[in-house]
Amino acid sequence: MIELEDIVIEGSHKNFFTPSVNFNAQTGICEISGESFLEDTVEFYDRLVEWLETYTQEIKRPIAFIIKLTYFNTSTSRCILDLLNVLKDYEEEGGEIVVNWHYDENDTDMEEDIEDYIIDTGLQINLIAL
């Protein structure tokens, strides 16, 4: 079996907003939280997409994908769609996934964004209002 390193990134609010990331290869728990407004969004998220692709093709264990973003920009939105599409492909191949998206119950824009992701990907995303 391939050895897959965990991805752990501590979020920051310096010049740009970097989300916290914790993708655990042993547990299959993958969490993104905080705010995502980056200088090079695609470069940041490509690493996460590649990790998820490797996990789904080589490790093939259940995945719990947890999103707790309070804000993300348009370029991040496209990258999140890429991540969710990898999960959908894995699900269609028989992989076991759960997607939980935590959001502020008063944030109707975020709720609409999540519902758009459900429509765009066909994934079941559990909306967890806080």
Image: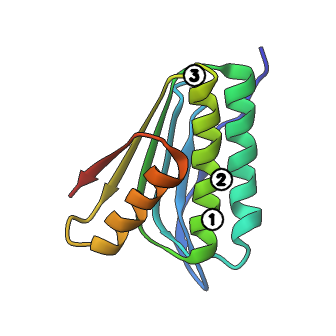
- Determine which of the numbered discs, if any, sits on residue 78 in the image: 1
- Name the residue at 55% across, 59% down: 10
Check disc 1 and give the amino acid type. Arg
- Name the residue at 20% across, 58% down: 130
> Where the N terminus falls, by quadrant?
top right
**90 or 41, nearer to the observer:** 90
- Mark 2 touching mark 1, by CB under 8 A? yes
**6 or 37, nearer to the observer:** 37
Q: Is residue 21 above or below residue 74?
A: above
Rate crowding at label 1 as few (under 14), some (14 to 19) or many (20 or more) other CA atoms within 10 Å.
some
Query: Sequence order check: which comes first, mark 2 or mark 3?
Result: 2
Q: CA distance from mark 2 to mark 1?
A: 6 Å
Q: Is residue 118 above or below residue 37?
A: above
Left or right of 39: which side holds 20? Answer: left
Location of mark 3 (residue): 95
Location of mark 2 (residue): 82
Residue positioned most to the bottom: 15
Check disc 3 and give the amino acid type. Gly
Residue 78 falls in image quadrant = bottom right
- Please state the horizontal and vertical placement of residue 16, each as a whole percent of the image: 60, 81
- Please state the horizontal and vertical placement of residue 83, each as a whole percent of the image: 62, 49
